[in-house]
Image (cartoon, coloured by chain):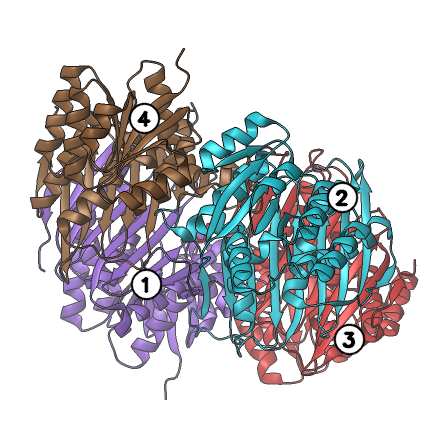
Chain colours: A cyan, B red, C purple, D brown
Amino acid sequence: MTTRLRIAFVGCGTHAGIAIYPSLRYAPIELAAVCDLVEERARANADIFGAGAVYTDYRTMLDRESVDAVFVVGPPDLHREVALEALDRGLHVFMEKPPAEDLAGARAILERSRATGRHVMVGFMKRFALAYGKAKALMSDPGFGKPTHINAKYCHWQCRDLHWHLIYMSVHMLDLVRFFMGDMERVHAEKCVAGGQHAFALAVKFKNGASGLVGLTAMEPRVQERVTLSGEGQMVEVDNLVDLRVFGREQRGIGLEFEPEDRFWRPDFAIPHLQQNSLFLQGYAGEVQHFAESILAGREPTSNIHDGYKAMQLVEILSSTDGETVPIPDD
Amino acid sequence: MTTRLRIAFVGCGTHAGIAIYPSLRYAPIELAAVCDLVEERARANADIFGAGAVYTDYRTMLDRESVDAVFVVGPPDLHREVALEALDRGLHVFMEKPPAEDLAGARAILERSRATGRHVMVGFMKRFALAYGKAKALMSDPGFGKPTHINAKYCHWQCRDLHWHLIYMSVHMLDLVRFFMGDMERVHAEKCVAGGQHAFALAVKFKNGASGLVGLTAMEPRVQERVTLSGEGQMVEVDNLVDLRVFGREQRGIGLEFEPEDRFWRPDFAIPHLQQNSLFLQGYAGEVQHFAESILAGREPTSNIHDGYKAMQLVEILSSTDGETVPIPDD
Amino acid sequence: MTTRLRIAFVGCGTHAGIAIYPSLRYAPIELAAVCDLVEERARANADIFGAGAVYTDYRTMLDRESVDAVFVVGPPDLHREVALEALDRGLHVFMEKPPAEDLAGARAILERSRATGRHVMVGFMKRFALAYGKAKALMSDPGFGKPTHINAKYCHWQCRDLHWHLIYMSVHMLDLVRFFMGDMERVHAEKCVAGGQHAFALAVKFKNGASGLVGLTAMEPRVQERVTLSGEGQMVEVDNLVDLRVFGREQRGIGLEFEPEDRFWRPDFAIPHLQQNSLFLQGYAGEVQHFAESILAGREPTSNIHDGYKAMQLVEILSSTDGETVPIPDD
Amino acid sequence: MTTRLRIAFVGCGTHAGIAIYPSLRYAPIELAAVCDLVEERARANADIFGAGAVYTDYRTMLDRESVDAVFVVGPPDLHREVALEALDRGLHVFMEKPPAEDLAGARAILERSRATGRHVMVGFMKRFALAYGKAKALMSDPGFGKPTHINAKYCHWQCRDLHWHLIYMSVHMLDLVRFFMGDMERVHAEKCVAGGQHAFALAVKFKNGASGLVGLTAMEPRVQERVTLSGEGQMVEVDNLVDLRVFGREQRGIGLEFEPEDRFWRPDFAIPHLQQNSLFLQGYAGEVQHFAESILAGREPTSNIHDGYKAMQLVEILSSTDGETVPIPDD
């Protein structure tokens, strides 16, 4: 009886070590083997995270190890390459975003996944961030009502170039907006270019009738992330991933009577538990749990390769648009 | 030697009594007479705010009183009507926004003001709100750099209808966005309609090259107002008019070294002084001061009828647009 | 039939003009006359706030004007002097805090008030501040439970000397603590003296069994005011008079399930109404309303001269104590 | 050449697994062996955190393994027992707080540490929390000036009993207050007892002349932790471990001119790096780093057994005092 998912892990870089490897222990996962081009890094991760075997060639690892799934965290073309190889070997795949270096790459993985019947999850961890998960749940409350509007902001320091800006940073928010509001009917993008950096202003019409604003800039001090979700009856806001506010029933009028009716949540950082653990706050632990539990249960995970493909569609649109209104394809 | 501006005031309604009359005492103004269709209200305001004469017909008041300027706070068509009458009599005018019930009305006042050489100020008090004034000044700091992006939000409870929503509420933010970022090249508006209420999502391209997002919805609990201004070097945010934050030089990297470099200001509500006085926080006192000082000095006030005309241009566009991109006329 | 309280006002200084005069219009009050040693100031206030007569000698004013009550806002010895005179004339009194320059002065007013059967209200406006009033009401909710603890802080810039620090600033918080928690059994005060300024740390045992902390320092940048009220079931915090938070039922455990159960309120500064009017936020309008309504209804106002006397008791204790524990007298 | 500290770890409970084991990887530490009475737990930790050997008896582990130091995380009597055994074997010790079940136990370890010349660090991780470390550094800025006052609050949900409340929870804040302000001259404690739970209000006089307030209650919803540090020139506040504010030079006066001069820092939770990693935010990673680096460099770590002894002194005082003022012994 399989109760833990046996995995092989490709990639031992900094990001994987900060975010993904430490998340494995919170999921029903057994780390069988790790692989990195630099053997020393692979060995260090095996020591720290308790893997049984170390490889420098992922194909050799997949030849020798008997696993259920492959994790891959590295450059986008590695994601695509390993994913296709793993799918062909009948393995499920967890990959960091972006799923590939371009839309065609994402398309190839999507089709291979459908052809092989094996699942590919793309690591849009923000969907699994504690406060965003709660915000999504709150949208299902009858009190929230029909979604009407979103204002989403993901602004940060300078990026190497526009492609880097879009596929490594903006792609997160493009997926998150779709997670909350569903598919888009059309998007209109305005941009400011200064010093080689871009500031995008997107006005969106969603298929569900809602309107939305998305700001994606690479000219900010620090990282500014905020999502405001409006429904007919409530407004839910998450700022900096840890400040969740729910504004409730209408409080109108010029009188002095008031009740402190609006609600909030913030983590208790003064005490060590999972609600303040950054792996859970940011969603890394949650996405890894979701993948493992989905595969073990024979279900397709959400934040799958189709979600990755839809996010890459928007990346491609933003790569070239300038003041145009673009309809979003249905595929 | 005139050191105080002598004024006659048309309109003694609730809003005028909350916001404009109590602001007069902070400006070099002498309130000569007040006028309201309801004599009792006019008399009450004369008592409370120390006016010497009371009228129920504004033309009679203007016939009899020797004043420098007229204040008018009432319905939009009254603004237009009184303004035209006052200009023809050689008087300056301070009027609450909106300047008129439609763009043509604003145009008429603009032309009469030019023809008579008399000034008309439109009460876009947010320009004079304490924190917004400071934000505008901070944009002139060399450290702020070239403006690149704005995210402005003015969301509130339900309005009677779309026209009311736009001319009484949205018009404030439409002017404020122009105050910070200058004239627009084009605007693209998406809207959601639910229960007769509207949620606008605007993507804007400014003439200075910046991109911007403006959210204007009438479906929120309470009033949500926030403006985020990005320059090449800094970001300035004002939330709820009283929380001012300045995010400074880039703080990148994954190390643990940090300095608390970002700056903030909030009013000290624990002590009575002008910095927490709501008339100053919201800009009412400031706009009245500015009007009186400008007229006394023979200068045209800012937030004048041309600004009012430009705001009404946007109101007219939003009244009819749906998913279109509209170039902004230059006049 | 009297429906408005007719008053004479002694004192036309800056503070009165910022806080008390503009509050009169929100109460059922008719301002009959104003008095100041400087006639020009008296005349200006009469103009601005609509008084019918102007005096430079308060006894003359009380001789000539037929009023129900006297307001006095000036130095502490003037408060005492005018209060005694007014009581002897059968008039009720509203006075700014402190009620007198020392405990004996407050005692004299207290006794004269009892002897004449006329009411004296002391302007501890913080009791009437919007958020504190709500906090007090929340303490009556069954969910709050028995009060167990208070942490109150009133810290501010440097004062002229210790006496000034205590009677003009600390006296506010000393009264407010008693407003929330009732009478004290004993107080222990530690102090730090630096540069002629004092930082008091008070541990308090209340008669109701609760424990409390009070910080009163005159060495801070800006004004820092915060009150945290704990009951067996809830915690209520008011920061800077405008951020009200209610922490509810116990939320323990290390799991990831949470509801945004804690509640908050803040004023909507984006819109002009009474909930953001500083006169209401700070309690000036409320205290004046309460005085007028109480006198008109024949009831003694709260925040009366006995409350003032109790606050002055603490001022006197703090004037001389250093590391001692002092029982609070019952009178 | 030793560049990594070789350690054996006693205790594989929940807390150790959440906070201490995951911190080892950020320090120059090699985890040689783990020990727990429950073999399965020891084996799980060896797998997850990469230890080479597993034991169920710590004396056997210390007999067989060649290590530099022992970590012990368990009940207080285990801390004492293992520490004494390890010191006698010439090993250094890192122990979770509290150092022992009572003051005598802490005294015994302190004396054994001095006798053997081996170091014992007590895990007061709050000293190493990111924002507290920065606050301590800010106190050394010339602008901060002489420390004058502290207001420290550590309030939380109900505890099993008073002893538990004090040795597991309050002990943290008692040490942290001493970390910031130095040794105490005397402490006066008032307490409220309700439903078997305690709310302590402490007024403290420090040897450096400062005054202080410490609130320690076990009747709150959630965990409320806040430290405010006042110096002659600045005030530094840390709320909930992640909101750091520095209030600077005096900003007095009733004018409208202001600069956003006060500074703040908060972690960027939107991006995975060490500044938002809960192990660093809370100080677990920092204390483990400090221990390893100190021992490798031949230095005594701070937060040592003497610090633990001083914290236990206060615990003992609070265990029995009720409204008394207690001088703090110098030892």
What secondary structure is found at the residue carrying circle 4? strand
Chain designation of label 2: B
- Label 1 vs label 4: CA separation? 59 Å
Which label belongs to residue D7? Answer: 4
Task: For label 2, count other residues whose C-alpha is less than 10 Å away and answer few (under 14), some (14-19) or many (20+).
Answer: many
Q: Is label 2 in a helix, a strand or a loop?
A: strand
Q: Position of residue C317 (x, y in %)?
A: 15, 45
Mark 3 and mark 1: Cα distance apart in space: 49 Å
Q: Are the residues under badges 4 and 3 in a single subunit?
A: no
The three-letter amino acid code for the residue at tag 3 is: Asp
Residue type indicated by callout 2: Pro
Q: Gap in Å between the C-alphas at discs 3 and 2? A: 49 Å
- Residue labelled with disc 2: B147
| Label 1 in the same subunit as label 4 | no
Q: Which residue is mark 3?
A: B63
- The reply to whether label 3 and label 1 mark residues of one chain is no
Depth check: give the residue in front, B35 or D162: D162
Q: Which of the chains bears the disc numbered 4?
A: D
Q: Which residue is mark 1?
A: C127
**Same chain check for tags 1 and 2:** no
Query: What's under tag 1, amino acid-wise?
Result: Arg
Q: Nearer the viewer, mark 3 or mark 2?
A: 2
Q: Are marks 4 and 3 in contact (CB under 8 Å)?
A: no
Residue D67 lies in quadrant: top left
Furthest residue toward top:
D1
Alpha carbon of mark 4 to alpha carbon of mark 3: how far?
96 Å
Name the amino acid type tagged 4. Answer: Ile
Between the residue at mark 4 and the residue at mark 2, the CA separation in whole angstroms equals 55 Å
Q: Secondary structure at mark 3?
A: helix
Quadrant in which the C terminus of chain C appears: bottom left
Mark 3 nearby-residue class (10 Å; few <14, some 14–19, many ≥20): few
Q: Is residue C322 visible?
A: no
